[in-house]
Image: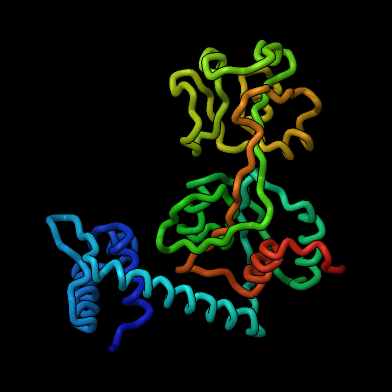
Amino acid sequence: MNYSIETLRTFIEAASLKSFSAAARKLNKSQSTVSSTITGFEDDMGFELFERKGRESTLTFAGQKVLSLVEDILAADERLQALRIELSPEMEPRLSCVFSDMYQPPYSEKLLKILDKEFPHLEFEFLVAENDDVINMLQNNQAHIGMMESRIEYPADIAFARLPIQGELGLYAHKAHPLVKEKQITYQHLTMNRQLRLSSRAQFVINSEKNWQAPNYLLLLEMAEQEMGWAILPTWLVKQFGHGLLMSLNYDQFPKKIDIDLVWSRNNPPGKAGYWMIDRLLKNDLQFSL
């Protein structure tokens, strides 16, 4: 068979988006190109991969079987490309990382010192964003590596790996806030008071008509310090930057552990320094030396 890695990626996008036209827009190709690529792949396989119903194209039973194998092939190709970059003497001139405030590696300062020693001519950029904003920055080539709260599914062009250490979220309010006096917080208590939440975070919204929003956790923390409402915040952030003004609220769902993923673009993968950073973070290696 004569399929290419590009053909397999086109198939993955079409399967993920359930639309040839949507896949074409995502891949910056014409719809006819995507359609002919899929048709050629079906001819090579000898059976149909999609059921074409109007504007939606869903996988056939055979297509679902092929999808699993194609994902394995692309994952193996990705590992091979990562090894090629790792062993290459050439290095990218710039590395941009967009990380969530949800989690801070306990050795982050040491990690950056090692990065500076290993790659002294590297230009490094550290950005902060949450959730969909992280993915958008990777897809728009604004960052090479991201860190975010884990989710069940990612876009087909986003690779991910679970970090070995979880983050933790707590429920907080200013020590003078009325909720602090409550021995046991109920859902009704929360609905009666203003919620401070991330503008990019949809889950755990108590009352969409009674909340203030901010783009990152640090701004939410500052708003909570000014007694503007209660907020869900990373516990490490409160301990390090809370100035002793915030109190943890006694609500049965918090504090809670949060899985964190590293993410990067398959279409614009990191370079040598980027994969070095990914490897260090995934190993949670506290033993490396300066």
Q: Of all residues shown, which one is farthest toward the left?
A: 54
Q: Depth check: 16 or 221 in front?
A: 16
Q: Of all residues shown, which one is farthest toward the right?
A: 290
Q: Depth check: 89 or 46 in front?
A: 46
Quadrant of the rendering where the N terminus is positioned: bottom left
Q: Can residue 219 be seen in the rendering of this structure?
A: no
Q: Position of residue 50 (x, y in %)?
A: 20, 66
Q: How many marks?
A: 0
Q: Position of residue 160 (x, y in %)?
A: 53, 61
Q: Depth check: 63 or 17 in front?
A: 63
> For this view, does 277 lie left or right of residue 197?
right
Residue 229 position by quadrant = top right
Q: Position of residue 78 (x, y in %)?
A: 50, 75
**What residue is drawn where x is 74% and y is 24%?**
246
Quadrant of the rendering where the C terminus is positioned: bottom right
98 relative to 34, above or below: above
**What residue is drawn where x is 48% and y is 18%?**
210
**What residue is drawn where x is 30% and y is 57%?**
17
Q: Can residue 147 be seen in the rendering of this structure?
A: yes
